[in-house]
Amino acid sequence: MGSIMGAKKFQLLFRRAASLDVDKSDLKRLTTFLNHKLHDLITVAEAAAKENGRDIILPHDLPITQGLENSMHEFKSFEIELELSPILEQLATMEPHELECAEETNARMPYFIGGLTISLAKTFKVLDPQLKNPREEHWESVFEIFDMLL
């Protein structure tokens, strides 16, 4: 399983968003999380597109909450760029979906991934404001929260 973002960008995002120190071993957890949520996002977006009689997933089909939208804007303000090609490569390796994403939908994926990463980092701090370096049990708790909400 390839990584959607490099370790340095991951570390920088967690440090800027929530003053957390993460290492390369945490990158594997993040990658698993992002792959899972990306699959969920496309699954829900596909259902919305089908419901509206379309055979392609448009950006407004993506189930982006207000909180996630805010994190996406914060990610943009960090001026950290994520490459689209690793994200699209991940999408191609996932369980197949019936519908394809429109180009403009794919173009939003780096912002979704960045916003989701920022939301994830901030969730660690909500659970434990004193936390500096998340451990496995912290990751498991945060994953459980996101699975309930997103």
Image: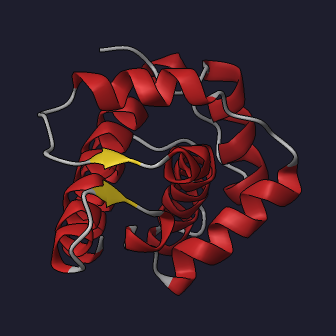
- Report x, y in % for residue 16: 78, 50
Of the pair 58 and 14, the residue shown nearer to us: 58
Q: x, y (%) of residue 73?
A: 74, 68
Q: Is residue 57 left or right of residue 52?
A: right
Question: What is the image's colouring?
Answer: secondary structure
Residue at the image position 29 percent from the left and 25 percent from the top: 92
Figure disc tally: 0
Check the image and report above or below for 135 versus 18: above
Most foreground residue, 118 or 35: 35
Asked which quadrant contains residue 75, the reply is bottom right
Q: Position of residue 112 (x, y in %)?
A: 54, 55
**Residue 26 seen anywhere in this rendered image of the structure:** no
42 vs 73: above or below? above
Give the left or right position of residue 50, taking residue 38 as reference: left
Q: Is residue 17 left or right of residue 111?
A: right
Instruction: Please say whether residue 69 is visible from this viewpoint.
Output: yes
User: Residue shown at 40%/67% (left/top)?
Assistant: 62
Q: Observer-nearest residue: 55 or 72? A: 55
Q: Position of residue 106 (x, y in %)?
A: 51, 44
Please report the residue visible at 58 percent of the width from the left and 52 percent of the height from the top: 104
The N terminus appears in which quarter of the rendering?
top left
The reply, left or right, for residue 41 in relation to residue 111 is: left
The residue located at (44%, 71%) in the rendering is 127
Q: Quadrant of the C terminus?
A: bottom left
